[in-house]
Amino acid sequence: MSEARYRRLFEDAPIGIAFLSKQREITLTNQRYRDFLGLSEPEIIERGPVGILHPNDWDQPMALSAKLRSGEMPLFHIEQRYIRGDGTVVWAGANISALRDKDGRLIHTIAWVQDITERKRAEEEKARLQHQLTQAQKMESVGRLAGGVAHDFNNMLGVILGHAELVLEEMDPTHPFHASLKEIQKAAKRSADLTRQLLSFARKQTVEPKVLSLNETVETTLSMLQRLIGEEVALIWQPKADLWPVRVDPSQIVQILTNLSVNARDAIAGVGSIMIRTAHGTFDKDFCASRPGSVPGEYVLLLVSDNGCGMDETLLSHIFEPFSTTKGVGQGTVLGLATVYGVVKQNNGFISVESKPGHGTTFSVCLPRYTGKLVRAQVQDDARATPRGQETILVVEEEPANLKLMIIILEKQGYAVLAAGTPGDSIRLAREYAGEIDLLVTDVVMPEMNGRELAKHLPPLYPHIKFLFVSGYAADVIADHGVLEEGVSFIGKPFSAEDLSAKVRQTLERALS
């Protein structure tokens, strides 16, 4: 075969080929190799291997090449990055072999190069999706654990809080045990807050969304937030005019702001500032493609920025994971940012963070714009005492201590109380009772049947009966993904005597309206 034909075969080969001299200089390339790099042959020869290989991928081929040249290995395969003429980075799988004379002396090193950039991108995308799946599975596991823990733990906390409240109502503040009881009450409330954070992170917190103005909701929390972060940190509020409405539980906005503000305060050494802003955002598919968990659409943005110490990339990659923390031992519950993440996801939104060491941090909470009719929530007068009642209430609670406590609270309010420890007992009691039963107060999670199923058995006996569901967490029995179904009355454990009395009265009055 003539040299011209060899040259044609070399030039038209479907794989990139380059010859390197004994001095590791590139001496010859074919068209596929030049197209791969986007460089002419003189440019490739001038740059040499050091100029075309990614600087982080140079050490390994040098070590392998030394073994190849010494005859220690006949060839090797390596996957490495190259720098194209336009500066972009591409991947190639390279088979490197040696051409020797009849006496075994090295003549050339030959590199056979195949573009694998798309395959590498697919592998990176697969790894990214696998990481997201692992994180989702981790959160789901913690969520299941949180639900089980919350149900039992909140039962016990309810007993502690309820009896402490009842004793404090009857005890003179000067009594020697009064201060100790207040401390017991305070510790129980803090424990309840921790459980709520865990449920928020796990997206199992029961919420009652309302259509609201985010600006108005934020403004009601500013005084509280300023007290929380202290006088040395300035709180700056920049609302956007004519802000779109959102549909969210107002208490969750307070929860988000509290956690983000505490996190910002802890990032500031001494004097500093925290800025809270609202804005509009419209995101398309291209924007969402690079932000896992986001969906194209119109959003209302709640941005919390600080001029604190900032975070590096390693910390940012784990910032929303449970028990990941920027704080020292004993500082905070290490669930704050995971809680925020859970709350935002529960409301079909997403959250992002931008930060650099020494340049502060900005959290961007994106909540879907509400496009329906704006209905403002009515504000209840907390100062008004809960009216007493005289209706008959059937209480179903499997935990004896909780059942006893609820009987005491409701009888003190004037209600006639029928009590049962199981759904079966409550149905038998309802069938045998000669009077009218106005309200069923039932735990949601019980043996035999859940609270919703129990409620279906009573209307044939008492057509006008109303229902109040009670639980440490609502699960999916009365809530869809943690969002309370329309018209369902629910109170979460643990609750105070005042909370239970108010919720019972509210449910009964709704029944009469």
Image (cartoon, rainbow, N blue to C red):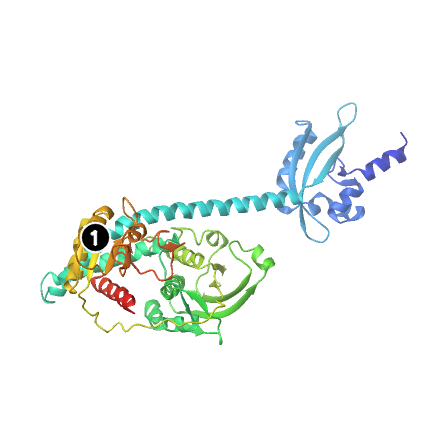
Quadrant into which the N terminus falls: top right
Using residue 396 as the reference point, say whether residue 239 is left or right of it: right
Quadrant into which the C terminus falls: bottom left
- Name the residue type under label 1: Ala
Pick the front one: 270 or 139: 139
Question: Residue at 26% of width from left, 65% of height from top?
Answer: 508
Using residue 12 as the reference point, say whether residue 77 is left or right of it: left
User: Could you say which quadrant of the image residue 217 lies in?
Assistant: bottom left
The residue most toward the bottom is: 241
Label 1 sits on a secondary structure element that is: helix
Q: Residue 9 location in percent, x, y?
A: 84, 35
* Residue 410 makes an appearance in the image: yes
Residue 273 vertical position relative to residue 351 in the rendered view, above or below: below
Pick the front one: 220 or 510: 510
Question: What residue sits right under mark 1 in the picture?
Answer: 430
Q: Residue 241 location in percent, x, y?
A: 49, 76
Question: Residue at 19% of width from left, 55% of height from top?
Answer: 160
The residue most toward the top is: 103
Q: Residue 193 location in percent, x, y?
A: 30, 58
Using residue 290 as the reference point, say whether residue 83 is left or right of it: right
